[in-house]
Image (cartoon, grey):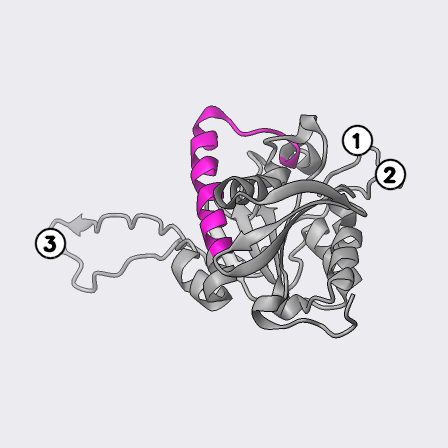
Amino acid sequence: MNSKRKTGMDAFFIIVGLGNPGRKYDGSRHNAGFEVIDELVDRYHIGGPERFGKSMIGKGRIGGRKVILVKPLTYMNLSGEAVQEIVHFYKADPKEDLLVISDDIDLEAGRLRIRKKGSAGGHNGLKNIVQHLGTEEFARIRVGVGAKPNPDFDLADYVLGHFSGEEKKVMEDAVAKAAEAAACAVTDGIDLAMNRYNTPRKRKKKAPKQEAEAGPDESGSETETGKKADETGSETETGKKPDETGSETETGR
């Protein structure tokens, strides 16, 4: 292979969806990234899948750009090993040629957050990718899967769990939108994808103004109760590192 890095339309654009391999994880909250990859494969008739080191990949085109769609087989916590392997092999520039898609429990179910770069925000898969690539400068799409039902609920059980009936429809729509956003990032750039597909934060309904006997308060003041979400997407890090043998029992965040 030519030692020089290809640029522009000649370079592969790498889209990585994060998740855990194995049928029992299909459709789980933690596998939102895998679901988006499957959607892209179907929409754009991507070839494969084939084994590439620590990943399953498919190759094809989105628009006029060559793409590689990637599902790491390392389990979530070691995703960086698979991503580093393929980025180095294809001499890709993470800043220009890489997009990572993951779940996010700090976003409402179905909401998308697209960024050009940023911290791992407590997501173990993203954290491992940052560690192996040595940079936070790569694009990512976070797909909201909703917060734990209560603080005492085990995080690993929650993210490895499956969606309820109502949530399934919301997530199907979110996966479809995330696939559209990923394709937009490939063909038109991440800035346009951010402008077009970042889901606005839901605003809490304001309480109606209370009227005193003499009439409404002239100041019309209201208490703003909705706080801005943490832009880092931070999460409590309770997941354990998976067994080096690839055990499927320790695949938490």
Residue at image position (56%, 68%) is 9
Q: Are marks 2 and 1 in contact (CB under 8 Å)?
A: yes
Q: Which residue is mark 3?
A: 215
Amino acid type, label 1: Thr
Image quarter hosting the C terminus: top right
Magenta stretch encompasses residue 213: no
Front-most of 73 and 69? 69
Give the spatial CA distance, label 1 vs label 3: 63 Å
The residue that mark 1 highlights is 249
Q: Mark 1: few, some, or many residues within 10 Å (few <14, many ≥20)? A: few
Please identify the dominant SS of the magenta region: helix
Tag shown at residue 8: none
Specify whether 219 is left or right of 37: left
* Residue to which mark 2 is pinned: 243
Give the residue type that dot 3 points to.
Gly
Q: Please state the extent of the stretch shown in magenta in the rendering.
A: 159-183
Q: CA distance from mark 2 to mark 3?
A: 67 Å
Q: Residue at x 54, y 29 (%)?
A: 163
Asked if the stretch drawn in magenta spans residue 172, the answer is yes
Q: Residues within 10 Å of mark 3 (few under 14, many from 20)?
A: few
